[in-house]
């Protein structure tokens, strides 16, 4: 396609032609890049004085990959990376790829088609396509095994993780590590190779180490690491071809399979999450230059599982933490757990014992809340009780220094009410971490009515700094994630009442790729929590004591995993085994309530459960509790195990078509939320709604 667009600068250093790709921020291979490279190669071909070419990225990086945004375009409008790669492979003069920042995906494929590669220390080289549900589609599956061997190539392509230039050097992936200025080094390297004949070509090499056992093990491995996913198997097949077939054959097959993978719903789901995660960091209506509080020291109230886990996030990035408890015993226990977590990581070889001590050395335990007076942010992480939280915030108001951020890790309570007991509600925010807080990447950032822009912006920046995915949510019972999960749990309970076995309800969600179904999740969280809430709500409303089948399970002393018995039995502590007692209890319950059990198909269970999430999600959007439907997807993928390759519940609904989602909701007796109904009737999607809202 000719667009007239050219994103590549041409300059000369004597007989070396320098092509600089200028497509900030990451020099993605967009329309205008191939045009510019071809124009440069035309010059190199026609000008006898040009003896070699250097391709380099302008700004902070080499090419970070094909432009993912163009994957939805028709083929003829897409930037033709394979065209450039083909030309480079047979090019008559040496071409040197000069790499800094990242050479990822199509970026590394571009470099692999060049004659030579040089890089600065610290540059990263990788083929992350698997993370987007595709496969390297511009020769990567055929060239990488020919350079680094089949085993390392499989490892890189299946993990998607890059290697640093230093390691790339030992693998033969780069020809020289450049100390000092990259362009100067690359030009010197090119100059030293102008007379080399014949020019080395990766496509002419043989891929080493491709034993049948290696590929059999890889096929076995991906069943666990990439369960239910489509592209990893194709990557293994193509890597095997690289070791067995002529280059041209494997390359042609790669091109065909790339298009197939790119057009799969799994890739659409993963691409959606890639952009959704980045979008979630943008807060509508907030100026980019909003001043932020510098976080140099943190305070945490509560050294339980949550408080300890939260502390670890700060310690991991070098922010010292003061942690407060009410008794020495609780403090010792909490610190013991943090230490043990770090020591376990050290045992696995992922950190040194020195690092363990360094981190523990930055954690100051205390029984005196007054010791929090120097903290820039204080996070309360005590149990969910409004009175206790209000008391803590009243005290904090008197202790915390002016400008300090006062955060609550509440998962359900009204942050406005908590803020109201302070004289500085603008400094109060909710930071809802997910358990285990040192592992789970999601952070719901709760914006209360009076939270200032600066505090909100600091909360989002802090999320990034402690390597979480922050999503802004509004105040309501359960915020976004738990509010939706509440409806999901209700639907699961109803399915069991209607006749489904709990393990079949869970299996329905496994079939969608979730590691846990709703009942396994309830058992893990503890059934007593919901039971206590229901009892409390009934008491407040003056209603009789709740007597659902889940209440009966708790009353029988089965609180979930922690008592080794809940909806399931846990003979080895962790693995759920269906419990006959639950079946009997359910059967008695149905009889008492006059419910006639019926067959519930897995398909019905999957739809009802998933759409209960979607329906509440639509309501949440309508109320402005979430900024965009893609934020809800990020929450469900990072906080609740919804498979990224399905794109999250809202994207999943878009893929099914909102008309069919609405029809199913009605068929199964749920009332579609007004927004869902409206979009369905107009033939639109949640993604359309997000776009429209972003336009204002
Ligand atoms: C591929 O190459 C297929 C080929 O094999 C075959 C083709 C035939 N495209 O992450 P950041 C945007 S598949 C379009 O915040 P960082 C990103 O959305 C591709 N846009 O920065 C964001 O936009 P905004 C294989 C892209 O410094 C902005 O750039 N490559 C792309 O934290 C900044 O990004 C990959 O999978 C792209 N490829 O991280 C690499 N990449 O400002 C994907 C980024 O509007 N990218 N953007 O929100 C990354 O992993 C990270 O972005 C990177 C920088 C590490 C590069």
Image (cartoon, rainbow, N blue to C red):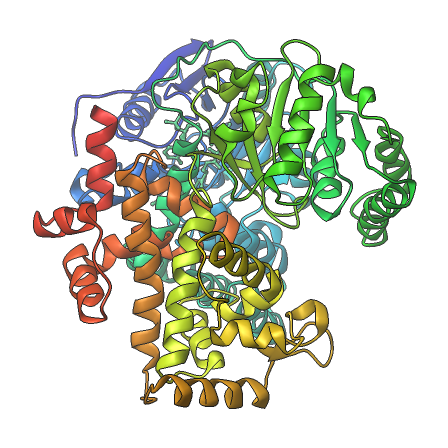
Q: Where is residue 471 in the image (x, y as percent from the top left)?
A: 46, 35
Report the front residue among 517 and 695.
517
| Picture quadrant of residue 303 | top right
Q: Position of residue 589 (x, y in %)?
A: 45, 84
Residue at the image point whose x is 26% and y is 25% from the top: 32
> Between 488 and 606, which is closer to the camera in this rendering?
488
Say left or right for 363 vs 209.
right
The picture quadrant where one finds residue 594 is bottom left
Most distant residue in the front direction: 542
Along the horizontal axis of the image, is 216 left or right of 486?
right
Q: Classify the position of the N terminus by image quarter.
A: top left
How many labels, in total? 0
Residue 189 position by quadrant:
top right
Task: Classify 691 as above or below 635.
Answer: above
Ligand 1 picture quarter? top left
The residue located at (47%, 10%) in the rendering is 290
Query: Which residue extends farthest left?
Result: 682
Quadrant of the frame with the C terminus: top left
Q: Nearer the viewer, residue 398 or 433?
A: 398
Residue 155, percent from left and from top: 60, 56
Q: Is residue 523 left or right of residue 597?
A: right
Does residue 685 appear anywhere in the picture?
yes
């Amino acid at each position: 396609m000719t667009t007239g667009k050219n994103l590549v600068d041409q300059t000369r250093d004597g007989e070396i032609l320098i092509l600089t790709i200028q497509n900030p921020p990451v020099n993605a291979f967009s329309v205008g890049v191939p045009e510019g490279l071809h124009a440069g190669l035309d010059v190199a071909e026609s000008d006898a004085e040009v003896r070699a070419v250097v391709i380099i990225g302008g700004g902070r990086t080499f090419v970070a990959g094909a432009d993912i945004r163009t994957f939805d375009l028709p083929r003829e409008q897409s930037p033709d990376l394979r065209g450039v790669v083909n030309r480079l492979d047979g090019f008559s003069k040496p071409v040197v790829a000069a790499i800094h920042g990242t050479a990822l995906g199509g970026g590394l494929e571009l470099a692999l088609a060049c004659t030579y590669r040089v890089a600065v220390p610290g540059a990263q080289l990788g083929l992350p396509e698997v993370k987007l549900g595709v496969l390297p589609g511009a020769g990567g599956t055929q060239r990488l095994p020919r350079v680094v061997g089949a085993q390392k190539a499989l490892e890189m392509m299946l993990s998607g993780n890059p290697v640093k230039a230093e390691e790339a050097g030992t693998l033969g992936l780069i020809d020289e590590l450049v100390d000092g200025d990259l362009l100067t080094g690359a030009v010197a390297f090119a100059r030293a190779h102008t007379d080399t004949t014949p020019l080395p070509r990766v496509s002419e090499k043989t891929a080493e180490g491709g034993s049948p056992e290696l590929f059999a093990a890889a096929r076995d491995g991906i069943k666990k690491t990439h369960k239910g996913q489509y592209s990893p198997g194709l990557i293994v097949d193509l890597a095997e071809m690289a070791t067995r077939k002529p280059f041209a054959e494997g390359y042609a097959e790669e091109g065909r399979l790339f298009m197939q993978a790119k057009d799969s719903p799994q890739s659409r789901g993963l691409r959606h999450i890639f952009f959704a995660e980045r979008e979630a960091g943008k807060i509508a209506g907030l100026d980019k230059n909003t001043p932020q509080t510098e976080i140099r020291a943190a305070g945490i109230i509560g050294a339980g599982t949550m408080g300890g886990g939260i502390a670890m996030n700060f310690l991991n990035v070098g922010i010292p933490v003061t942690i407060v408890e009410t008794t020495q015993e609780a403090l010792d226990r909490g610190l013991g757990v943090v230490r043990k977590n770090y020591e376990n990581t050290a045992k696995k070889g992922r950190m040194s014992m020195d690092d363990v001590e360094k981190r523990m050395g930055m954690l100051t335990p205390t029984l005196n809340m007054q010791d929090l007076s120097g903290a820039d942010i204080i996070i309360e992480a005590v149990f969910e009780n409004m009175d206790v939280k209000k008391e803590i915030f009243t005290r904090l108001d008197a202790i915390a220094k002016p400008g300090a951020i006062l955060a609550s890790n509440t998962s359900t309570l009204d942050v406005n009410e908590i803020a109201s007991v302070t004289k500085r509600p603008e400094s109060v925010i909710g930071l809802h971490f997910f358990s285990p807080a040192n592992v789970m990447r999601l952070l719901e950032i709760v914006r209360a009515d009076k939270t200032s822009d600066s505090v909100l912006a600091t909360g989002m920046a802090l999320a990034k700094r402690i390597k979480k995915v922050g999503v802004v949510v509004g105040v309501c019972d359960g915020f976004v994630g738990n509010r939706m999960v509440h409806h999901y749990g209700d639907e699961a309970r109803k399915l069991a009442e209607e006749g489904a076995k709990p393990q079949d309800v869970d299996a329905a969600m496994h079939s969608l790729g979730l590691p846990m179904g709703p009942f396994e999740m309830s058992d893990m969280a503890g059934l007593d929590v919901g039971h206590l809430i229901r009892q409390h709500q009934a008491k407040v409303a003056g209603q009789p004591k709740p007597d659902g089948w889940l209440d009966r399970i708790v009353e029988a002393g089965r609180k979930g995993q922690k008592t080794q018995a809940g909806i399931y039995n846990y003979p080895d502590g962790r693995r759920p085994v269906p419990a006959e007692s639950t079946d009997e209890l359910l059967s008695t319950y149905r009889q008492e309530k006059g419910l006639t059990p019926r067959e519930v198909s897995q398909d019905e269970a999957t739809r009802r459960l998933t759409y209960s999430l979607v329906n509440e999600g639509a309501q949440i959007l309508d109320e402005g509790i979430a900024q965009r439907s893609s934020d809800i997807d990020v929450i469900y993928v990072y906080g609740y195990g919804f498979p990224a390759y399905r794109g999250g519940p809202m994207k999943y609904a878009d893929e099914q078509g909102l008309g069919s989602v609405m029809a199913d909701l009605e068929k199964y007796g749920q009332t579609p939320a007004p927004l869902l109904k409206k979009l369905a009737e107009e033939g639109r999607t949640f993604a359309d709604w997000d776009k429209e809202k972003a336009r204002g």
